Image (tube, rainbow, N blue to C red):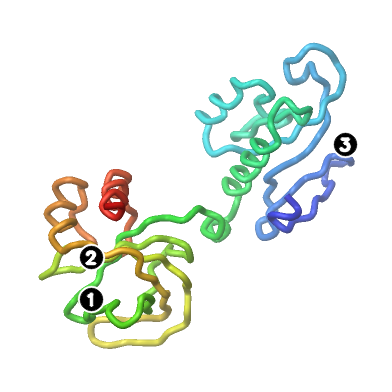
Amino acid sequence: MKKKYEVVEDYPLPTAPTFPVMRHPDTRKWFAIIMDVPKDKLGLTGQQRVDVINVKLSDALLVDVVTRQDGYFKGYHFNRGNWISILLDGTVPFEDICRWIDESFLVTASKQRKQEYRPPKEWIIPANPKYYDTKHAFDEKSEIDWKQGTGIKTGDIVFMYVTAPVSAILYKCRVTRTNIPYDYTDDHLTIRSIMKIELLERFKPDRFTFHVLKNEYGIYAVRGPRGVPYSLSEALKSCCDV
């Protein structure tokens, strides 16, 4: 936790001064606490004290599923929220403990932090051929500047949907840099920041048309950056693999 998230533990509990708590640097919210508790407090046999780490999961259903496994318990000392206690005696593999710490960090993070740490995401972004020569966009270089899309970050994948008269997805790109300051305004467009996108694949204009997107994948409009449904994502990957 110290190495990955660059946090330092503190000890805020007067009645348990040896229990380290890990907090988000910005919001000071807890995302983990390590403690030792009597076994019988966890529903186990005996009163020996055992080490546990408490972390928070995303929803109650996940808590219910996870705590059916050996080494997992409903959060000790947390009577609300989706906290769990995980034994630190080797019952639960170290890699799994790390995964739940990561989950807790994201669940308790601020909106900005969640954006920083979320995994790469796929987007569809619109491009209007009236204002940009989309047909020849990548003829001379594989990386171009593009208007920054809200929520898009470095490492994301964007599929460029070229509007009428083309009305189809033409390009798959990777975002290589974001939030580059830029100042442009005309009668149709205002740009305050841009991102750089790198061409990965081209699609034939008759493959992912607006008709196909609407009738097969339920996409009725692309007016701004939007997520890619799973079924469409799989179809786009399959097409790229050919």
Whole-number angstrom distance, CA of label 1 to CA of label 2 = 9 Å
Q: Which residue is mark 2?
A: 170
At x 60%, y 35%, the residue is 81
The 10 Å Cα crowd at callout 1, few under 14, some 14 to 19, many 20 or more, is some
Q: Is residue 223 visible?
A: no
Quarter of image, res 82? top right
Vertical side of 237 occupied by 99: above or below: above
Q: Disc 2 marks which amino acid?
A: Leu
Do the residues under discs 2 and 3 have CB atoms within 8 angstroms? no
Q: Position of residue 213 (x, y in %)?
A: 18, 52
Do the residues under discs 3 and 1 have CB atoms within 8 angstroms? no
Q: Is residue 170 left or right of residue 44?
A: left
Vertical side of 51 occupied by 126: above or below: below
Vertical side of 67 occupied by 205: above or below: below
- Secondary structure at numbered mark 2: strand
Do the residues under discs 1 and 2 have CB atoms within 8 angstroms? yes
Q: Is residue 181 left or right of residue 103?
A: left
Whole-number angstrom distance, CA of label 2 to CA of label 3 = 62 Å
Vertical side of 189 occupied by 115: above or below: above
Q: Position of residue 155 (x, y in %)?
A: 47, 62
Mark positioned earlier in the residue sequence (1 or 2)? 1
Q: Which residue is mark 3?
A: 15
Q: Disc 3 marks which amino acid?
A: Thr
At x 69%, y 24%, the residue is 71
Q: Is residue 134 visible?
A: yes
**Depth order, front residue of 197/34:** 197
Q: Is residue 157 left or right of residue 169?
A: right
Mark positioned earlier in the residue sequence (3 or 1)? 3
- Secondary structure at numbered mark 1: helix
- Secondary structure at numbered mark 3: loop
